[in-house]
Image (cartoon, rainbow, N blue to C red):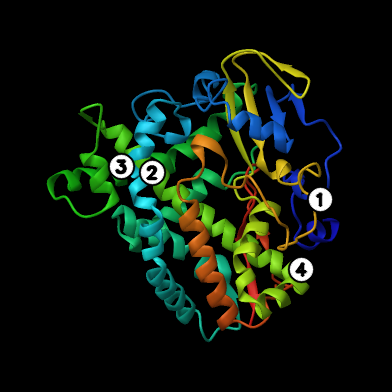
Amino acid sequence: MSDIVERYNISKQHFWLHGPRTGPSVEYDAVAGMYNVHGYQEVQDILADPTTFSSDTIRLTPKGLLPEGEEFSLKGFITQIDPPEHGKLRKLVSSAFTRKVVADLEPRIAELTHELLDAADGRDRLELVTDLAYPLPVIVIAELLGVPSSDRALFRKWADGLFQRDTKISFSEPAENRAAEMEATMRPWREMTRYLAEHAAERRKRPRADLLTKLVQAEVDGERLPDDHVINFAMLLLLAGHITTTMLLGNTVVCLDAFPEQQDRVRADRSTVPAVIEESLRLFTPFAAVARSTTREVELAGVTIPADKIVMLWFGSANRDPRQFPDPDVFDPGRDPNPHLAFGRGIHFCLGAPLARLEGRVALNILLDRIGTFRTDPDDPVVFMPTPTMTGVSRLPLLR
């Protein structure tokens, strides 16, 4: 990977892209105050045991590292919820992502892809993120949710404000050191909360055939979802529903630029497009890490982890574990099987994975039809997102 790291100027914070690890599968980071898990099997074991490794990490976040008061609530954020509540909430939106519902979106995804590429015609280069990889999935998820896709500039501003940060994760740093960062995060949070609250209130008065209406009308155990649950659920769907595909599509094109022989192969045999996408997900895992909290003392790979500790699961490292993936730094779409963890595993497996895969497949095929060889411009370099736990490009100019 050394050539790729140098070519795309990949930050050292994205350590999983800098070649094979030599350290243990599980290790304690005293500076950050948490345990890091890098091994494939160890990550799988954690994901299979939500009783021991809870998704509720907020309970362990030191006081002062999160805002206080009514303006901030994570109630309804399904990624922070354990069974049995998790299953009840997940069921509410699972019907929006069934195989048939997703498959029926294919013509719309193709139409949007052509429209976005038509708008970029006549230029000497295509900036893949701004011209296609960002607007395509955000329009699709906005239409599903029922908010105006014309507001996508707002969504991008909020997503950038929440995710485009190069701050390392730490559960031990004094709160006063994070005050400015917290305020910078809260601005887009407050704006997005107000925006979605207004749309939710409108749906209560005038229901429509969209996902937001389904959320405001939904009942759990005979009771309607509270307002903050609806807003946070909608926020998560809107953000996660487009960010993953934006990174997936950009990362796949980067892989084909970095490995031109594989680009030639997929152009010659389009049946390999799904495999190209899966290998891109493994090699450049979009959400490269998620957190869990221990509910009891547990031993993992010979390391004893006490109760009430944060455990960071590094999907990016696990997807490059040589015990599971031979030659893990090689981009090999012929890898079979390819049981990567890019969409997680178990009860929190990504709800939108079928949609992200479909959007990636449709868009990549159309890009291969309409654009010659994917070539980045050395004078206008690719820019990777600075976020330590995410792998994706924020800028990807392609020469025509």
Name the amino acid type tagged 3.
Answer: Arg
Q: Is tag 3's residue or tag 2's residue first in the polypeptide sequence?
A: 3
- Pick the quarter of the image with the N terminus: bottom right
Q: Do the residues labelled 1 and 2 touch (CB within 8 Å)?
A: no
- Which label belongs to residue 194? 3
Q: Is residue 367 left or right of residue 83?
A: right
* Residue 168 seen in render: no
Name the amino acid type tagged 4.
Answer: Phe
- Which label belongs to residue 259? 4
Name the amino acid type tagged 2.
Answer: Met
Q: In this view, does 5 lie above or below 60?
A: below
For disc 2, the marked residue is 235
Q: Do the residues labelled 4 and 3 touch (CB within 8 Å)?
A: no
Q: Is tag 4's residue or tag 2's residue first in the polypeptide sequence?
A: 2
Q: Is tag 1's residue or tag 3's residue first in the polypeptide sequence?
A: 3
The residues bearing labels 4 and 3 have C-alpha atoms spaced at a distance of 44 Å
Q: Which of marks 4 and 1 is in front?
A: 1
* Frontmost residue, 252 versus 197: 252
The residues bearing labels 4 and 2 have C-alpha atoms spaced at a distance of 36 Å
In terms of secondary structure, where does tag 3 sit?
helix
Query: Callout 2 environment at 10 Å: few (<14), some (14 to 19), or many (20+)?
Result: many
Q: Give x and y (percent) for residue 375.
A: 70, 76
For disc 1, the marked residue is 326
The residues bearing labels 4 and 1 have C-alpha atoms spaced at a distance of 18 Å
Q: Residue drawn 46% across and 57% down?
A: 355
Query: Callout 3 environment at 10 Å: few (<14), some (14 to 19), or many (20+)?
Result: some
Q: Are marks 4 and 1 in contact (CB under 8 Å)?
A: no
In terms of secondary structure, where does tag 1 sit?
loop
* Residue 2 seen in render: yes
Q: Give x and y (percent) for residue 54.
A: 53, 24
Name the amino acid type tagged 1.
Answer: Pro
